[in-house]
Amino acid sequence: MKLSGEAVLVRIFIGEDDRYQGRPLYRAIVDAAREQGLAGATVLKGVLGFGCHSRLHSASLLRLSEDLPIVIEIVDAPDKVEPFLARLDDMVTEGLVTTERVQVVAYRANDES
């Protein structure tokens, strides 16, 4: 698959402890994106953040890491992202999902699987 030109960036902000059907939500989202044939997904773990409840989540050395912020980024063509957003609506019960138009400069997938 080769993706270039205009695309959509989906950013999903959740907590590390969030679950979907008994497993980590970030893993369930990445698996769902893969099942739907999206170009790729990246999970980023934050060291500090807060959400709608204004409770700080931190990777402080003074205490154990507690529900750290997670951001999942997915980029693909608009017609592939749209059905995925409907699936996210069922999966993400608390968090934030944003989309924005982006310009893909280079994406080169190896045809060998």
Image (cartoon, helix red, strand yellow):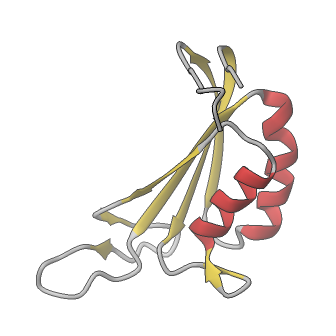
Q: Is residue 5 above or below residue 15?
A: above
Direction from residue 61 to residue 5 in the image, left or right = right
Query: Which residue reaches farthest left?
Result: 62
In front: 113, or 70?
113
Q: Is residue 45 above or below residue 10?
A: below
In front: 40, or 110?
110
Q: Is residue 77 above or below residue 51?
A: above
Query: Which residue reaches farthest front?
Result: 112
Q: Quadrant of the N terminus?
A: top right
Query: At 53% across and 15% down in the image, what residue appears?
Result: 106
In front: 80, or 82?
80
Q: Is residue 34 above or below residue 39?
A: below
Residue 30: which quarter of the image?
bottom right
Direction from residue 96 to residue 44 in the image, left or right = left
Direction from residue 49 to residue 13 in the image, left or right = right
Residue 49 percent location from the top left of the image: 35, 64
User: How many discs appear?
Assistant: 0
Residue 27 percent location from the top left of the image: 59, 67
Q: Quadrant of the C terminus?
A: top right
Query: At 12% across and 79% down in the image, what residue appears?
Result: 61
Residue 19: which quarter of the image?
bottom right
Residue 79 percent location from the top left of the image: 86, 30
Direction from residue 50 to residue 1 in the image, left or right = right
Residue 80 percent location from the top left of the image: 82, 36
Residue 21: which quarter of the image?
bottom right
Query: At 29% across and 64% down in the image, what residue appears?
Result: 48
